[in-house]
Image (cartoon, rainbow, N blue to C red):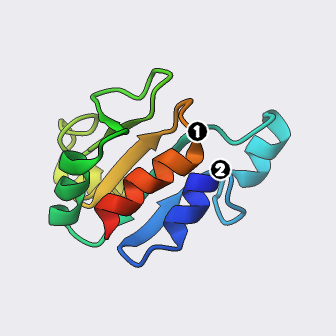
Amino acid sequence: IEIAKWLKEQDIVKKVVYPGFKEHPGYEIIKKQARGFGSILTFEVDSKEKAYHILENVKLIQFAESLGGTETLITYPITQTHADLSKEELDRNGITDRILRLSVGIEGAEDLIADLEAVLK
């Protein structure tokens, strides 16, 4: 996915988790079981403040509770999908206040990249 590759090139993004990357632990399994790697990715930015900045300032990408739809959606797991987990469970699963999840929709990749580029600068 173009967006996952693009995110890996930005200094503010510290980590991108996407099953379409060879270093992902499930890469070989999903390659055998599916005809693609899906449209959901997780990325970690350099601070909680930057995560909030992204959520508050993306224009095309919508901030949402769940990741199901045709439009591109972004979530903040620590206060949404994983809010009921203990500190130990969050740590064990790598969920921090710098983690965002993105479900890429049907919009053009160039438009989504432009949206992310504007808020990551």
- Position of residue 11 relative to residue 108, above or below, is below
Residue 1, numbered label: 2
Element type where label 2 sits in the image: loop
Which numbered disc flags the more N-terminal residue, 2 or 1? 2
Identify the residue at image location x=72%, y=63%. 22
- Residue 39 shows which numbered tag? 1
Three-letter residue code for mark 2: Ile
Q: Are marks 2 and 1 in contact (CB under 8 Å)?
A: yes
Side (left or right) of 85 relative to 118: left
**Residue 62 x %, y %:** 32, 34
Say whether residue 31 is left or right of residue 75.
Answer: right
- Locate the C terminus and report the quarter of the image it occupies: bottom left
Outermost residue toward the right in this view: 32
Residue drawn at point x = 27 percent, y = 52 percent:
90
Under mark 1, the amino acid is: Ser
In this view, the residue in front, 97 or 110, is 110
Check the image and report above or below for 47 versus 68: below
Residue lying farthest bottom? Answer: 11
Rendering coords of residue 37 (x, y %):
69, 42
Picture quarter containing residue 36? top right
Relative to 95, residue 31 above or below: above
- In the picture, residue 39 is in which quadrant? top right
Q: Residue at x 18, y 47 (%)?
A: 56
- Comparing 89 with 118, the one in front is 118
Rounded to the nearest angstrom, the CA distance separating label 2 from label 1 is 8 Å
Under circle 1, the secondary element is: loop
Residue shown at the point (74%, 42%) measured from the top left = 30
